[in-house]
Image (cartoon, grey):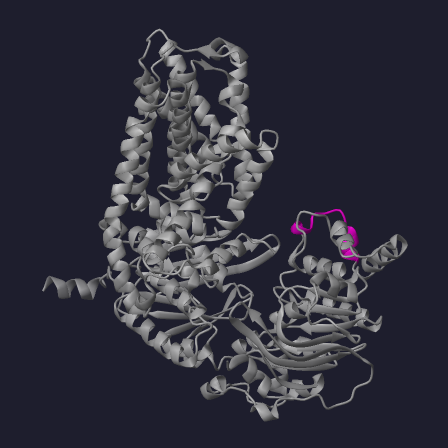
Amino acid sequence: MTETGTRTTDPPVSRLPPPGEAAPLLDARQITKRFGGLAAVAGVDLAIRKGEILGVIGPNGAGKTTFVNCITGLDKPTSGTILFRGEDITKQPSYAIGRLGIARTFQVVKPLKQLTVRDNVAIGAMFGARGRERTAKQARERAEEVLTRVGLAHRIDHTSSDLTIPDLKRLELAKALAMDPELLFLDEVMAGLNPREIESAMELLRQINRDGVTLFVIEHVMKAIMGVSDRLVVLHYGKKIAEGKPEEIVESPQVIEAYLGERFAKRAKMAGQPERMTREGVFLKASLPEAEAWKPSLPLPGETLLEVRDLASGYGQVQILWNVSLEVRQGEVVALIGANGAGKTTLLYTLSQLVKPKSGAIRFEGRDLTRSRPEKVVGAGIVHVPQGRRLFSGLTVKENLLQGAYLRDDPAGIEEDLEWVFGLLPRLRERASQLAGRLSGGEQQMCAIGRGLMSRPRLLLIDELSLGLAPLIVDHLLDLISQINQKGTTVLLVEQDVQVALEHAHRGYVLETGRVVQSSPAAQLLEDPRIRQAYLGL
Amino acid sequence: MRAARWILLAAVFASLLVLPRVVTSYKLLTYTTVLCLAIMAQGWNFIGGYTGYAAFGNVAFFGIGAYTTGLLMLSKWQLSFFPALFAGALLSACVATAIGVPVLRLKGHYFAIATLGVAEAFREIAGAWNSVTQGATGIDLPVRSDSAFFYYTALGFVVAGVGLTAYLAKSKLGYGWVAIREDQDAARMLGINTTMFKVAAFALSAVFAAIAGGIIAYQNIHVAPNDFFKIEYTLQMIIACVIGGTGSVWGPLLGAAVYQLLSTFIWSHFLELHPTVLGAIIIFFVVFLPRGLMELLRRLAAVARGGRFGSDILLANVRASRLD
């Protein structure tokens, strides 16, 4: 009676929120992480609900891993608050966060190399959420259970440094699971697995989730993330640009933009092409039968500068490039595009001999550079502006530029070129005596290109020109590339933003899973619907 | 196999026990020195071997142990040897903790150089603090000419050290140390309080160094800054660990014995080239057996059981030392 009375006069203030909108397990508010001038994560609000599988996607450099680093205490966020079960954990050290019940895997696997697989996992069981309940011996027994679960029991007594990449990914998962987490962050645990292994990994994730573990899954394997996630979040340039059910996300124009570049998305719209990708479209693989694989056919003006034949390359036992053939002619700008992990960066590394080719041939101006050394390649006139810039952060801008002229011994010419670079990039003249590490992201990229130019290259290899840079700076750098090109330097450009790359190139090559699947004049590639598939449909 | 190992150990231990009865007391001094080196090396093994932090200043704790032991025995309380020795060990552990908290944040060669600097600082302090340490002249301890006493004391600590290492290696502390050595970020994410674990290893290594310092101080009667804070002691403990096998239970003891044996042998055969030859041998160990003699013994044991020697793994070791 009284109850009814209360209800009519005074609506009850429910202590418990309605189901489905329960207080999130983890609530990250306005997380920002800056590295120098670059905001890797910029004001991200993200709530993880108890019991869900939350998928996170976004192009390279979107800030996905940095976000996880912030949550797990490996990087301290520049600003923002993180609540776990309502408790503020923003300032907690990572070991304490681990003990609270948050575990993670590392994208670049971090096995404890000299230890056996069992000991690797036992350490997780020893120090994780329920570590205090276990002796070292019990933890070793627990390790066996976990390893059986992830399908690694047959390797239990192997030293972890002997494992293959897929097994190392399983080991990462096992270590994290052994910590009995309530919330588990998985950073690309499926990269490098074959389709059948991906199927079983997906099933394993669902099982783990059914056992009460909330999952946060970062994954580039679209099929997998679409299949397992209850919800998806899309990060781009450190910002959250979309959030929702997987089927809503794939149709979001913003996501297409994030993956293919703003201008590409606009163009697709204008051309009247369906900017909505169907789910099938996302999964469709733009692979060509071997017989149809591209062979250079169009004769182009200019002499062949760089000729690559059937190049195979990779790291250790992992092969990345398979029979890659391409050529770059004198005076061209050639764009190399393809999805994450297609092998673009590896190709540049192989050309500059930082990664040794397994087979095939590289010829530059008729000279064989297949089995050369990095410094000889520079001497021959090929200069690599690497991804992440790799400046000497403790040296000044001017010193960095002069390092680029290391192999030259014509002081007058060096002086002249320094003036030329300063003329092209006046910002660098202003900052000449500043430490390179203190520059903003865009200035660092300018400095890296300037350093490359200082050796008077015949061919400039540029990896991810626009990565992490604001559109305005990207435009500026692209004008610069055109200027350099008109002065006679040939450019091979790896670029994530397809539109940007193709609009400024004469020709383009599309790389997919380490193979060249297409090659055309840039203008033709811009119109080709298969490009989107190559990017989104891995 | 297991039984054979125990019989071998028992035989070695028995012969070590009867040693003072069969050798001259002068010879016994040398053996005591080897045992003290083993104690220091066992200590260094915790921080340098298990935790993977190349501490280059452990002689500081050796010196602190020596001075504290001596000064407390000479003080108005006239402490007897063992209480003084343990007080020195405790003080060393405290100093190591205080230094360790900031210095163990450094990695790689920065940590090595910082610890090197700390050791030099303590040498300067010992030389300059006239009112307590009597400066460069040093202090004179009460005389005890019973060389068997020193020998058995050192042997006792070596045995305790082996026992403690064997226990810790299988404990959570030991697992935590190894995790830090292999990958500090991964260790953190696995829930290991890395700072605390590293400081514990550093403090424990200081305790061992201080005990060795105290024993040698009492045996040598005289303690002076340049003798007890010299970098050679640090180098010897590291070399002993490397030769024997870092991060193993028996490695430091085995390494200390082999190092002393080699050193004596080379002295008598290549007097003038002594440092050169010894250096060459150390380089050989670092390159071909970076995991020490214990690894070689494990290999040989595997062959004895009918397995392979696995020389390919030996080559992998060489490659792992990043020789291009």
In the rendered image, the residue lying farthest to the bottom is A291
Foreground pick, A496 / B89: B89
Instruction: Name the residue at the right extreme.
Output: A412
**Residue depicted at 28% across the width and 27% down the height:** B18
Q: Position of residue A364 (x, y in %)?
A: 76, 74
| Residue plotted at (47% across, 80% down) | A250
- Span of residues in magenta: A426-438
**Image quarter hosting the N terminus of chain A:** bottom left
Residue A341 image point, x, y percent: 54, 73
Tell me if A360 is positioned left or right of A411 in this view: left
Depth order, front residue of A217/A350:
A350
Residue B57 visible? The answer is no
> In the displayed image of the protein, which residue is found farthest to the top?
B76
Magenta stretch: includes residue A88 = no
Q: Position of residue A78 (x, y in %)?
A: 51, 51
Count the numbered circles shown. 0
**Residue B38 visible in the picture:** yes
Q: Is residue A522 left or right of residue B96?
A: right
Q: Position of residue B293 (x, y in %)?
A: 43, 45
| Residue B262 to residue A200: above or below | above
Magenta stretch: residue A433 in it? yes
Secondary structure mostly taken by the magenta-highlighted segment of the chain: helix
| The one of A529 and A2 positioned closer to us in this rendering | A529
Q: Is residue A527 left or right of residue B61?
A: right
Q: Nearer the viewer, residue A108 or A440?
A: A108
Q: Which residue is found at the position 35% from the left and 67% from the top? A: A215
Using the rendered view, name the quadrant where residue A246 is placed. Answer: bottom left
